Image: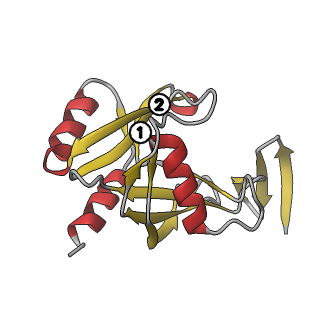
Amino acid sequence: MIATLYAGRFLEMVQDDRWEFVRRRNASAVVGIIAVTPAGELLLVEQFRIPVGARVIELPAGLVGDEQADEDLATAAARELGEETGWEPAVCTVVARGPSSAGLTSEVTTLVLATGLRQVSAGGGVAGENITVHRIPLARVPEWLAERAASGVLIDHKIYAGLWWLSRQP
């Protein structure tokens, strides 16, 4: 039986037998978006993340169902990609699903491949997110990430999974 140890506005800490973990209260899922512009640039976002106390480079990502309870993954991925990067996809395809941090949270992230992109705005997220959008030529991504990591920026590992999925595309 799951017992709630703490309930905040967006998260709750729960206990199931001997295991304590965190789960979201206001979303049904999380999407991470793999998106390449028509010019062959991988879209990445960078922002300061309070829990790790550092700037983090990530795939564009966001919550599913936080604005509309019955929102599907593709709709949420398109919405989040637009908000964060300013690019709109023609098609969103689920490519993988897995735990974000299986020992800490019940959160599962679904990776979505966004194709047929067109730029509709500058992006940058919603008020207060302060997201920096990066457009990195695919051939340069590993070198660019290494440079950013050497400068002290944290790199989200899901980017490497996204690159692997891109390498499998025809």
Q: Residues within 10 Å of mark 1 (few under 14, many from 20)?
A: many
4, above or below 17, in the image = above
Which quadrant is home to the C terminus?
bottom left
Tell me the residue at 82%/41% (across/down): 9
> What amino acid type should be assigned to the residue bearing mark 1?
Val
Q: Residues within 10 Å of mark 2 (few under 14, many from 20)?
A: some
Which quadrant is home to the N terminus?
bottom right
Question: Which secondary structure lies at badge 2?
Answer: strand
Between 50 and 139, the one lying in front of the other is 139
Tell me the residue at 48%/56% (across/down): 32
Confirm whether residue 168 shows in the render: yes
Q: Quadrant of residue 71?
A: bottom right
Q: CA distance from mark 2 to mark 1?
A: 7 Å
Tell me the residue at 39%/35% (across/down): 133
Between 78 and 73, the one lying in front of the other is 78
Residue 162 in the image, given as x and y percentages of width and height? 33, 59
> What amino acid type should be assigned to the residue bearing mark 2?
Gln
Q: Which residue is mark 2?
A: 47
Residue 22 in the image, given as x and y percentages of width and height? 70, 51
Q: Find out whether the residues at labels 2 and 1 contact each other: C-beta distance under 8 Å.
A: yes
Q: Which residue is mark 1?
A: 45
13, above or below 92, in the image = above
Give residue 140's mark: none
- Residue 17 shown left or right of residue 101 in the figure: right
Between 163 and 170, the one lying in front of the other is 170
Question: Which secondary structure lies at badge 1?
Answer: strand
Residue 5 in the image, given as x and y percentages of width and height? 84, 48
